[in-house]
Amino acid sequence: MKTKFAIVLLLVCSLPNCVVAQKFNRAVSFASNFEAPIPHPEQDKLAQEKLAQLKAKTGKRPNIVWLIIDDMGYGDPGCYGGGAAIGAATENIDRLAREGLRLTSCYSQHTCTPTRSAILTGRLPVRTGLTRPILAGDKITKNPWADELSLAKLLSDAGYTTNLTGKWHIGEAVGMRPQDVGFDEFYGFYPAQKEISQSIDARRYPDLVLNPELLEDYYDIGANLNLVHGFKGGKTTNVSAIKSTEEMGRADQVLADFTVAKIKELAKSDKPFFLEHCFMKVHCDNFANPDYAGKSKAKYAFKDNVWEVDMHIGTFMETLKEEGLLENTFVFVTSDNGPQMDAWPDAGYTPFRGAKGTTFEGGVRVPGIAYWKGMISPGQESDDVFDLMDLFGTALKLAEVSYDKLPDDRFYDFIDQSSYLLTDQGKSNRESVYFWWGSVETAIRMREYKLHTKVILPKSKNLYIDMSLLVDLGLAPWLFNLYIDPKEQTTVGHRRNAWLATIGGQLKAHLKTFKKFPAKKIGLGL
Ligand code: CA
């Protein structure tokens, strides 16, 4: 922690508010290598009874389905204030929110790879080294996955069938692919949409696409841009290459067809399943599927793609219903980070400050909808904090995987949120959400407060990635009360807030975990 910030803490600690730290911080540690949860014994008991009753009825553990949209903003779905009001209705996502639990303080990491790795490892990217995409040509010193234990592996070992359809983005070399780290089957793309489309879209990238020599150099880097089909311990094949923007526009339909067929196949099995469907959309560059162009009222490709993603979610839910799986399947819909404003107007919407690439709310607060017919009551909503990493701990609970299966030589950041999600008016079991920018700690949220120790500021409008600065702060950290200042515009500072020392103390305790369990370095340089 910075010296200047430590001085402020010392000053504030001389005030009486320090003595109430235990009450403000409700978490209770149960092991030195796990994030401490807030105990809710009554809620835990209710959730446990619900799960036991369901198992007695179905005779098997529940299925787990994650639907991950790429770069959708908090404000894009109708149930979060967007939808038809901003030119792209999202009737299926809205219905899931109405019939399930809508989270309004659900947090991702600030970009794609960190979120995707965190939810599958239950650990902050800074701990695993999976802080950014590992690109062809990157000279990493070790395979970060080599000593990580993925949720897919844990569930697979526990008798689940595990599938990942769509975007991966957490390493494409042998040993880092979904089928190498625990998934039984992978059908999708290793990179994001733009990494594929930049070699075929002559309108946006003429300097590359229309220059054969440069294009050859680009392909020589060795990135795999194909649709890939791989099996654990089996064959991995390149199914096809995207050769046009029209084909790119159709990619999500191909992936959705695969997932629908897979759900029907999995429904016939006695085994429970874990299915993670990762849309390519709505990451830039967006090309409308030619079959759906103009379906949104706004007509922009981004908006048509929001409409399309929503339609596929509707189809998945209909398929689960037709196959009789709804009552025994936990479904979670989210986005892996905030909108990428660098690509505006090919970008989503957030009502908050910042965007993808920053740890302001605009970059990390995302839609989060939990749906489970009969297990989550309709019409629930909560502003308690939820970190997408908590999906890891929640899945372990649903699959009855004991923490004994987790190695004790590393720190786990997830919280089991099953009791929060499954009880009416449930309370979050998480006390704090920690924000990192690569290997740099930048912020913490506790209750309605968000404290920044460093900020990422754009030097040009909307360029939060391509022209931004990571900035040290002055004498005091920036502290916002998100209830009165959700856009993080006016810090309440150390003069007007009694909790600064307590929140700072929580952050210090978090940083201390890295002393006993050092962050893994893989040579990515961020
Ligand atoms: Ca993303």
Image: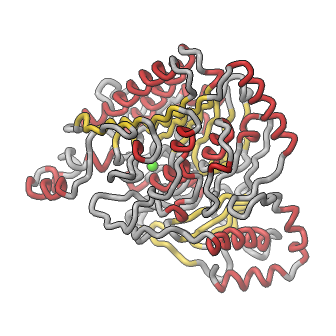
Colour convention: secondary structure
For the point 60% across and 38% down, the residue is 81
Examine the image and state in which quarter residue 333 appears: top right
Residue at the left extreme, as displayed: 212
Q: x%, y% of residue 471?
A: 52, 75
Query: Looking at the image, which is closer to me, 349 or 252?
Result: 252
Relative vertical location of residue 329 with respect to residue 509 in this rendering, above or below: above
Q: x%, y% of residue 497?
A: 79, 70
For the point 61% across and 34% down, the residue is 79
Q: How many marks?
A: 0
For the point 70% across and 57% down, the residue is 482
Q: x%, y% of residue 520?
A: 50, 68
Relative vertical location of residue 418 with respect to residue 522 in this rendering, above or below: above
Specify whether 451 is left or right of 468. Answer: right
Specify whether 392 is left or right of 463. Answer: right
Query: Looking at the image, which is closer to me, 211 or 224?
Result: 224
Q: x%, y% of residue 152?
A: 52, 42
Examine the image and state in which quarter residue 214 appears: bottom left
From this viewpoint, is residue 344 visible?
no
